[in-house]
Image: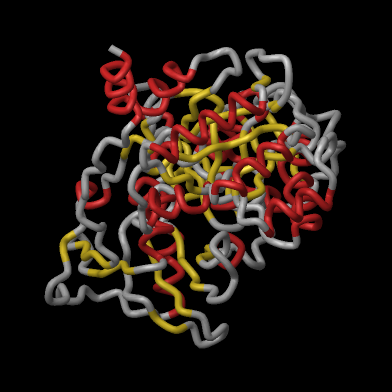
């Protein structure tokens, strides 16, 4: 009877076979405009909105004479390759909005001088960096589709502009984009659209936009080529120590769980490994599982020793404003092969704080941890699992590469890059329940 139970438990904890999906292509062809897109521009295009935000390519990659950088024009943007800049800034967007409006003197481009706090409201935000406001539909679009990282700061107020066809639009310019309001599409995803500034810049600078033939062996673009989603248990822990509770697990029980994972063929990976596989088709071990700790409580150092003794790795999301781990311990964790991420500066509910505090929580926590660690901080975990489109926009603008929710299951996909799900592991569950979470949840 005992042997039967052990066999059942072993089966429940053994890694299920990973389906081997074909690798996504590194170059594709768009017959709509007759141009190719290849890496690293392809990944950036896919991960930041694709056709919806940037449109189709209107040129092949070329070397910009002024900067010496490789650039490529899309209908609504121009991409720049910044070699050696690192994963978070290898591809940058040209300030097409600023370039194409240089010298314009209409009243809408004149900076406003206002108190950013006195004039803040849920549907309105003032940017002292450029002296312009963002409100209502444009503000929602800006926050939902990339914020500062994609569009930059506003450089005008909303105003009426007549395009080359003689049609009048309400528009607002940003450093890297022009928003156009289409009231006839109110209530649809296309109420706010982006102007064709990338195509306009290509025309102004004489960049060749004539269609080219498809290269031999290159596939035509289809979203089906890039569907990459898989079951990936990302386990979430908090405190380590006695006595057991929802957010506290005794060290002996935690070590039992680690031993079970090892005994049944699981391999722990960091968030960098997980996102690299998810977004770029990176290498994927057999039986992957990610273990994360939130807050940076003192007992997590004991957990790290348990990992090290077993050759396992984890990701620690630290709150530098109130961490129970010392600077020396945080540096040591990184040197031991573990990953350090940010869990905000002081762990507030980010959905409820003002814009200024939100920015400080996501950006200063990153800066402080980078100063401690001496390396980039790439990933963020939302404190309390609280986030919305405004919070996501701030995390993107601060330069993170991805973010984690607190709950949500085990199905990871590129579409959930800014809120990948995790599984909470309570200190109260049995070893059998732990096995179910890892394999079946």
Picture quarter containing residue 87? bottom right
Seen from the viewer's position, the closer of residues 147 and 87 is: 87
Residue 279, x across and y down, in percent: 40, 52
Indicate how the structure is coloured in the image. secondary structure
Residue 136, x across and y down, in percent: 59, 29
> In screen coordinates, is 356 left or right of 150?
right
Quarter occupied by the N terminus: top left
Residue 349, x across and y down, in percent: 71, 23
Quarter occupied by the C terminus: top left
Image position of 435 with respect to 63: above or below: above
Seen from the viewer's position, the closer of residues 253 and 95 is: 253
Residue 192, x across and y down, in percent: 45, 37
Residue 287 seen in render:
yes
> In screen coordinates, is 429 left or right of 264?
right
The residue under the point 58% across, 44% down is 314
Total numbered labels: 0
Seen from the viewer's position, the closer of residues 346 and 422 is: 422
Residue at the left extreme? 216
> In screen coordinates, is 10 left or right of 275?
left
The residue under the point 38% across, 20% down is 436
The residue under the point 45% across, 48% down is 274
Image position of 218 with respect to 222: above or below: below
The residue under the point 61% across, 62% down is 98
Residue 184 seen in render:
no
Seen from the viewer's position, the closer of residues 260 and 315 is: 260
Image position of 226 with respect to 306: above or below: below
């Amino acid at each position: 009877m005992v042997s039967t139970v052990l066999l059942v438990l072993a089966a429940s904890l053994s890694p299920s076979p990973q389906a081997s999906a074909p690798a996504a292509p590194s170059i594709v062809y768009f017959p709509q405009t007759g141009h190719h897109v290849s890496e690293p521009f392809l990944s950036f295009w896919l991960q930041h909105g694709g056709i919806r935000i940037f449109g189709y390519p209107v040129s092949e990659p070329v070397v910009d004479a002024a900067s010496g950088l490789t650039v490529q024009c899309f209908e609504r943007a121009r991409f720049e390759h910044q070699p050696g800049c690192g994963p978070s800034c290898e591809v940058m967007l040209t300030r097409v909005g600023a370039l194409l409006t240089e010298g314009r003197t209409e009243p809408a481009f004149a900076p406003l001088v206002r108190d950013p706090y006195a004039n803040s409201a849920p549907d309105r935000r003032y940017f002292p960096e450029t002296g312009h406001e963002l409100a209502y539909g444009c503000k929602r679009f800006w926050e939902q589709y990339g914020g500062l990282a994609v569009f930059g700061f506003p450089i005008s107020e909303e105003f009426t502009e007549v395009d080359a066809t003689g049609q009048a639009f309400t528009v607002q310019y940003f450093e890297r984009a022009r928003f156009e309001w289409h009231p006839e599409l109110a209530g649809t995803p296309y109420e706010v659209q982006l102007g064709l500034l990338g195509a306009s810049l290509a025309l102004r600078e004489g960049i060749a936009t004539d269609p080219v033939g498809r290269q031999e062996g290159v596939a035509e673009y289809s979203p089906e080529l890039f569907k990459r989603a898989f079951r990936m248990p990302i386990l979430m822990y908090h405190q380590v120590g006695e006595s057991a509770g929802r957010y506290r697990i005794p060290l002996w029980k935690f070590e039992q769980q680690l031993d079970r994972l090892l005994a049944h063929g699981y391999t722990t990976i960091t968030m960098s490994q997980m996102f690299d596989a998810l977004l770029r088709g990176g290498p994927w071990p057999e039986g992957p599982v990610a273990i994360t700790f939130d807050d940076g409580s003192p007992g997590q150092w004991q957990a790290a020793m348990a990992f090290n003794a077993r050759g396992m790795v984890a990701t620690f999301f630290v709150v530098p404003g109130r961490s129970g781990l010392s600077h020396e311990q945080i540096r040591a964790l990184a040197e031991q092969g573990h990953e350090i991420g940010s869990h905000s500066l002081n762990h507030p509910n980010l959905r409820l704080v003002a814009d200024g505090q939100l920015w400080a929580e996501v950006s200063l926590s990153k800066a402080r941890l980078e100063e401690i660690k001496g390396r980039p901080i790439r990933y963020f975990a939302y404190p309390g699992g609280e986030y919305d489109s405004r919070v996501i926009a701030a995390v993107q603008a601060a330069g993170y590469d991805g973010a984690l929710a607190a709950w949500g299951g085990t199905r990871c996909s590129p579409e959930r890059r800014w809120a990948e799900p995790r599984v909470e592991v309570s200190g109260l569950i049995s070893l059998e329940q732990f096995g179910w979470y890892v394999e079946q949840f």
